Image (cartoon, coloured by chain):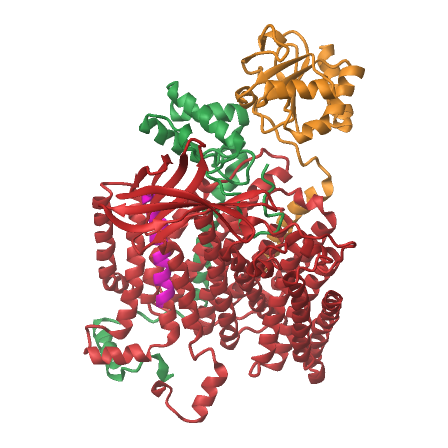
Chain colours: A green, B orange, C red
Amino acid sequence: MKALIAGLGLLLALAVPALAVEPNERLADPVLEARAREISKGLRCLVCQNESIDESNADLAKDVRLVLRQRLLAGASDAQAMQYIVDRYGTFVLMSPPVEPATYVLWFGPAVVLLLAVGGVGMAVRRSRLAVAPMPPPLDAAEQARLAKLLHDSDQPESAA
Amino acid sequence: MRKSLYALPVLLFLIVAGYFAVPLFSGRDPHELPSAMIDKPLPAFDLPALAGGANISNASLLGRVVVINFFASWCVPCKVEHPVLMRLATKEKLPLIGIAYKDEPAASQKELTNGGDPYLQVAIDRKGLTGLDFGVYGVPETYVVDKSGHIRKRFVGPLNAETVERELLPLLRELNRS
Amino acid sequence: MIIELGHFALILALVVAVVQSSVPLLGASRHNHGWMAVARPAALAQFVLVFIAMAALTHAYITSDFTVINVIENSHTDKPLLYKVSGVWGNHEGSMLLWVFILAICSAAVAVFSDNLPRELRARVLAVQGMISVGFLLFILFTSNPFLRAFPPPSNGHGLNPVLQDPGLAFHPPFLYLGYVGFSVSFAFAVAALIEGRVDAAWARWVRPWALASWCALTVGIALGSWWAYYTLGWGGWWFWDPVENASFMPWLVGTALIHSAIVVEKRDTLKSWTILLAIITFSLSLVGTFLVRSGVLTSVHAFAVDPARGSFILLLLLVAIGGSLTLYAARAPALKSGGVFAPISREGALVLNNILLASAAATVFLGTLYPLFLDAVGGPKITVGPPYFNQTFGPIMVPVLVALAAGPLLAWKRGDVLGAVQRLWIAFGAAFLVVLGGLYVTQGGPVLAVLGLGLAAFTGVGAIVEWADRLRLLRIPLGQSFGRAVNLPRAAYGMTIAHVGFALSVAGISAAAFSVEHIDIVKLGGTLEVGGYSMKLVKVDEIPGPNFVAEDATIEITRDGALVTIAHPQRRFFEVQQQTTSLTSIRSSVLADLYVALGESDSKGGWTIRAYYKPLISWIWLGALVMAAGGMVSLSDRRWRVGAAKRLRGSAVPAAAE
């Protein structure tokens, strides 16, 4: 197993130069091969840290790539081929975890955080505006024009301050 | 209400910190990797036997409790595990089936001849595809299979005396009773 | 002897740090000038002491002193000098020392340049810096001491991991740490302000340059790491949403929010408690980033248990620093008075939106990084959170960020005119439209999302330039007057425009990554391989010796339509000491696209695996990051920050504009 360098004191994940898919693994049919590559990107190299089998040169990743291609050659759909691997290694092998109760927080957390933040700020802004004197009404067209003229005449940007 | 809002960050932080502290002091086994194959029937396989003769298949193992051990001559942790397996085979008469994972048959044979052979039978999985069907991460790995041919437990990494006493043997006794 | 001197200096530094963290703080609360005055010499003394320690360790590395365990484990006599030096921080112990060293530099800088800071504030800020120093020095001395000796010394060391022997990676940690540690100053200012219960425009004016400088360093650090991954991994990947990367990305996101919200505090006297919170969180995430990466806990929660002393210490330190500051925040922040009121549609409103989005983005990265560990800790299922998750959650949050980024600066403070902003952005809309049309045409309806990403980047980039032109009233007043305005425009305004354009460049590069073309094949000597309209001919593969490795060096002629473009020399390097192979890719970068070639293994039948890629606009990712950092630096050079200078100018009655 790649005892990753995190422990050895590195700031960036790295593996020994992973040279991923080897030419001799590839399927003759470019369409099938493209499908295999795409599926590979969604499957984790089980013995690596955070690498898909498409990126990894670990032996096990290579085996999974080969089996995946065999499945596709045997006529499996993308979902079936993927399920074949999941049946053996569990959902742990998926780069994108399934949406299930245990991962609700993960999948919906970001949206909830965002909504709460927007709502909270919206309320805070409303309250602070109500608390202080109401805003003057926006400038009408004539006032706008006068303002523009004033600004134009003075023509001295920020540095005057 | 407004004031308590300012305490939210520290509360959130304490919760997160708590989750990091718990594993530190819980002493739970960090190596437990759940297998997707638990309680599922053995995957189909039909592999040549190292000793020659009839092939070893999932069907040939039916009707008895067996322990399947994936090993290889090139695997260093397997050498650590080897004495444990030898003791299990001789003292406990454990029905051990070996599967030589991605190994030269000659190398596997040499290893067993030199170091002792704890297995009833050894199957040859040259390409590791049967291993993949089992959901093997690496060697050694050990699977406990019940009489009906269902996988009941997986041990990742070398077995040691403690896991054998605490988990493997009790499980085998239970499976043999039923 | 020198090693003992370094060790002793570090112990002394701890003593000084204890004084620095306590005496000035007491002095500030008792208004005792003498006690407060201790802060400055203490900070300077600490700098000198930590410098000695750092120099001692560096000396041990340069002279390959194998009586020092740390040197044995991470160095080797055959290593080139650059990597002997970078080996100092290429390991846990040394990197912690580097951290404290940078902290000491920051504290000394605050001490030196704080003449016009209120005495109490200065004393408190330096005291907080001292506390951080105490924590880290204790950590180093008790659990990660780089000065331990070995006896008898071995004849040579284990060498540095070959993948670390790379110029990009040699400078990656120092920049990252400059960022992390720089944020400690904003943190110290935030904590000091909470103790004092006062935040005003002057405070923000002090905090912002520090935050900005740290942010620039962090930006460069992250970009260096990503660029390194790109040219070293051999298949052109540059960002993996790996926990280790995320650990540095989170403080960057929150830090970005911080440098924006600090503007609002300064200009409009509002968003104070939020800005304080951001300062605390940014530094907290920096701490988490430093420790969790180093301790390996991000791979597994159980990594802590492997070294319980270190693990407990880290947890305790985080608990005190983060928990303590947040508790102080809970107690004191409600009392901070907020000044300016603003409408939702206004410059403030846009900056608040930017903050919400960036904070949510950081929360998303946080969730994705730590949720698997969390599930594991509560006994839940083991899951993998990989790039698809981040692309689906983080990606959408960035879209409104880009839109707000273009529109925000066009809105007025307090109350803005959205319609006016939209109207002034018509050129940006047009540019985006053209880019999307052009993109769809060139790629023949290719990856639509990527084309839309490019369009969005064009909108944002052009929008930033439109805002600048708007300030100059370009084409609306005579060109000469516009020029005069351009000269008088504050540097901070230029900095913003540059940074925003940089961000747009990065987004464009990231979007264009989807257009990358790949061709992997086994090529015989004399054979060719086609990619992106280029033809690559493998001429020969030589074996050439390096200082501490042997390389297989391929000569590949790259031609286009028969004309020679360049000769590429990708290598595979074998490091004898570590028995490891690394790959050196050959990349021909141009503004429009990179040609990327990596040499794979030989099939021992006269063929070699060649990986060739054609990657349009990919270098924009890092170029954009550099432009962003440059924007930050330009903004830093604004005379507004040099508070003293401004005072002097006013004193001599020279109109500022005439400078």
**Residue B152 shows up from this direction:** no
Q: In this view, does C342 lie above or below B100?
A: below
Q: Give the range drawn in magenta.
A: C497-516
Q: Nearer the viewer, residue C411 or B161?
A: B161
* Image quadrant in which you'd find residue C299: top right
Q: Is the magenta stretch mostly helix, strand or loop?
A: helix
Q: Which of C402 and B9 is in front in this view?
A: C402
Q: In this view, does B166 lie above or below C342?
A: above
Q: For the point 57% across and 80% down, which residue is it?
A: C117
**Residue C655 shows up from this direction:** yes
Q: In this view, does C172 lie to the left or right of C598?
A: right
Q: In this view, does C458 lie to the left or right of A65?
A: left
Q: In this view, does A46 lie above or below B123?
A: below
Furthest residue to the right?
Answer: B91
Q: Is residue C527 left or right of residue C393?
A: left
The quadrant in which the C terminus of chain C is found is bottom left
Q: For the point 38% across and 70% down, which residue is it?
A: C495
The picture places residue A59, in percent across and down from the top left corner, at: 53, 31
The picture places residue C81, in percent across and down from the top left corner, at: 57, 61
The picture places residue A118, in percent across and down from the top left corner, at: 44, 54
The quadrant in which the N terminus of chain C is found is bottom right
Q: For the point 54% across and 54% down, which residue is it?
A: C547
Residue C123: say if magenta.
Answer: no
